[in-house]
Image (spheres, helix red, strand yellow):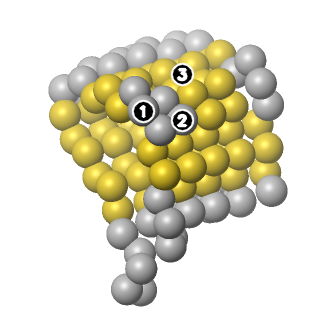
Amino acid sequence: DAGVGVIDLRGANITLSGAVTTEAGAHLRLQSTGATTLGAATVAGDISIDAAGDLTAGDLAAGRDVALRSSAGGVSIASAKAGDDVVLRPGDLIFVPERLIRF
């Protein structure tokens, strides 16, 4: 598809403190060997985050899937909404003060 794209970031520690918004089926993929921090994100496609350390995120909304994994740390998010699946795999604890919604 001409309108489909990917925001793909890899690094030791990733911090995106502002809001991330995509259109037209685009995906957000973050992969870190340390901690990952993401503010709010609204993505037409998938949100996929793979962190070795703690993973912290604000409000997440995806047109398709939300997949969050921390191999050695915790996963803490404000909320998650997805058109299909929401998957959280922590190495330690999960903290979600709001709700997880599939729409």
Q: Is residue 50 above or below residue 12?
A: below
Q: Earlier in the sequence, mark 2 or mark 3?
A: 2
Residue 53, image x, y percentages: 35, 18
* Element assignment for label 3: strand
Q: Which dot, 3 or 1, sits closer to the camera?
A: 1
Question: Which residue bears the numbered disc 3?
Answer: 75
* Element assignment for label 2: loop
Which amino acid lies under the numbered mark 3 shown in the image of this protein?
Val
Which amino acid lies under the numbered mark 2 shown in the image of this protein?
Ala
Position of residue 43 in the picture relative to residue 26 (left or right): right
Q: In the picture, residue 9 is in which quadrant?
A: top left
Q: Is residue 48 above or below residue 98?
A: below
Q: Earlier in the sequence, mark 3 or mark 1?
A: 1
Which label sits on residue 40?
2
Which amino acid lies under the numbered mark 1 shown in the image of this protein?
Gly
Residue drawn at x 41%, y 86% as measured from the top left: 1
Q: Is residue 10 above or below residue 47?
A: above
Residue 66, image x, y percentages: 58, 47
Is the residue under label 3 in contact with that under label 2 (CB below 8 Å)? Answer: no
Q: Is residue 56 above or below residue 102?
A: above
Q: Earlier in the sequence, mark 1 or mark 2?
A: 1
Q: Residues within 10 Å of mark 1 (few under 14, many from 20)?
A: few
Residue drawn at x 42%, y 79% as measured from the top left: 3
Question: Which residue bears the numbered disc 1?
Answer: 18
Which label sits on residue 50?
none
Spatial distance from mark 3 to mark 1, Cα to Cα? 19 Å
Q: Which dot, 2 or 3, sits closer to the camera?
A: 2
Q: Residues within 10 Å of mark 3 (few under 14, many from 20)?
A: many
Residue 13, image x, y percentages: 24, 24
Front residue of this view, candidates 45 and 54: 45
Residue drawn at x 36%, y 69% as measured from the top left: 5
